[in-house]
């Protein structure tokens, strides 16, 4: 594993968009939203679970409004049809490895049914998304299940969020580099209210990376063969405390998918690109006429989260010889400086 200190986009001095970042520049800047990881790294496994937990679920509210956008539907998003039909979620959202998604969903279901207040529940739809970590992990062994689910939920907390080669991003590959988990947030005024919108992503897709409009081709930046993206997918989760209804959240989720193009996604045929947006707000939804700033803030947060998922990832390898290299940060700094995006910074920022 690469132990080199990593950096986020803000550490490189890059401002993306016109809205300020939240305190931790993470989805957890949205009040009551927690994130936890369970990470598995061995010679043959780089995998895990990432849990996005709205505290209000199971603590007084059985449902919260949510919206879904499908960029390309070649994936395994468990719980999608109820989410789309009812415009709500009733469990935390878990992200994991493709062939472990069903084991994770069953474990999440078991966890929820064991919670106080769920003793008589006879129907419940867990929400589990996935991307394929088969380039760096023995995916057919389906190694992720109840222990990792319980660990990710137990670890869920507010504050800074671990990024890169952790949790569900442990074995993913994006744009020719090691991908993984990334997060970001923005504060924005919607009508008369000030709100936060945050995003977390699991990146595993192809294309040519662009950071602030500057191309970063993996064939030029990393040694040896370019890491291969298997499955070619991306999961995006957006949270906000703006009191949007399900229809408005679906509009927000569509903008989240659009943001993938900003980092160079090629939206290949076999991709499973999904965005789920949910709200922890509980007052009257704003008029659609005032939503444009929130849409823009969503796209900015998602684009930065995608970049962070690559900048913070560490090099990972598999016993069969597969390697996904971390993007070299010094070269990134040099190219951004040459393009006039930022001044040259040293490795300590």
Image (cartoon, rainbow, N blue to C red):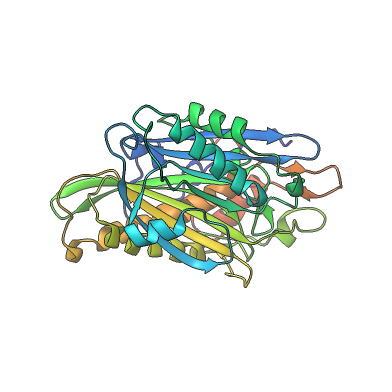
Looking at the picture, how far across and down is residue 140, in whole percent?
75, 49
In which quadrant is the C terminus drawn? top right
Q: Is residue 188 left or right of residue 271?
A: left
Quadrant assignment, res 259: bottom left
In which quadrant is the N terminus drawn? top right
Q: Is residue 326 left or right of residue 187?
A: right
Looking at the picture, how far across and down is residue 327, in whole percent?
66, 49
Give 208 or 38, whichever is nearer the viewer: 38
Seen at 52% across and 46% down, the residue is 182
Seen at 60% across and 34% down, the residue is 146
Give 203 or 154, whichever is nearer the viewer: 154
Q: Is residue 230 above or below residue 115?
A: below
In the rendered image, the residue lying farthest to the bottom is: 269
Seen at 49% across and 31% down, the residue is 153
Seen at 62% across and 71% down, the residue is 268
Looking at the picture, how far across and down is residue 217, in whole percent?
67, 62
Q: Is residue 136 visible?
A: no
């Amino acid at each position: 594993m690469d132990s080199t200190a990593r950096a986020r986009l803000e550490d490189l001095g890059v401002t993306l968009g016109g809205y300020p970042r939240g305190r931790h520049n993470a989805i957890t800047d949205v009040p009551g939203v927690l994130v936890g990881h369970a990470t598995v790294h061995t010679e043959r496994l780089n995998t895990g679970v990432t849990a996005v937990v709205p505290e209000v679920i199971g603590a007084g509210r059985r449902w919260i409004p949510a919206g879904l956008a499908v960029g390309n539907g070649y994936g395994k998003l468990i719980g999608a049809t109820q989410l789309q039909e009812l415009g709500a979620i009733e469990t935390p959202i878990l992200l994991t490895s493709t062939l472990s998604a069903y084991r994770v969903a069953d474990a999440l279901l078991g966890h929820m049914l064991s919670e106080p207040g769920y003793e008589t529940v006879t129907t419940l739809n867990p929400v589990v998304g996935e991307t394929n970590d088969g380039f760096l992990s023995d995916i057919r062994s389906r190694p992720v299940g109840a222990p990792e689910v319980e660990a990710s939920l137990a670890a869920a907390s507010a504050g800074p969020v671990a990024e890169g080669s952790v949790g569900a991003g442990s074995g993913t590959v994006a744009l020719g580099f090691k991908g993984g988990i990334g997060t970001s947030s923005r504060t924005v005024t919607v009508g008369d209210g000030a709100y936060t919108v945050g995003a977390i992503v699991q990146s595993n897709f192809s294309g040519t990376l662009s950071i602030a409009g500057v191309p970063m081709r993996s064939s030029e930046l990393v040694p040896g063969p370019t890491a291969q993206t298997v499955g070619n997918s991306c999961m995006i989760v957006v949270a906000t405390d703006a009191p949007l209804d399900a229809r408005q959240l679906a509009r927000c989720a569509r903008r989240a998918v659009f943001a993938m193009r900003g980092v160079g996604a090629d939206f290949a045929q076999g991709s499973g690109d999904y965005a789920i947006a949910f709200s922890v707000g509980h007052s009257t939804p704003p008029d659609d006429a005032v939503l444009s700033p929130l849409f823009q803030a969503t796209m900015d947060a998602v684009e930065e989260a995608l970049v962070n998922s690559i900048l913070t990832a560490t090099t990972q390898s598999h016993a069969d010889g597969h390697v996904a290299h971390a993007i070299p940060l010094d070269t990134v700094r040099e190219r951004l400086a040459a393009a006039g995006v930022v001044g040259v910074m040293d490795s300590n920022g």
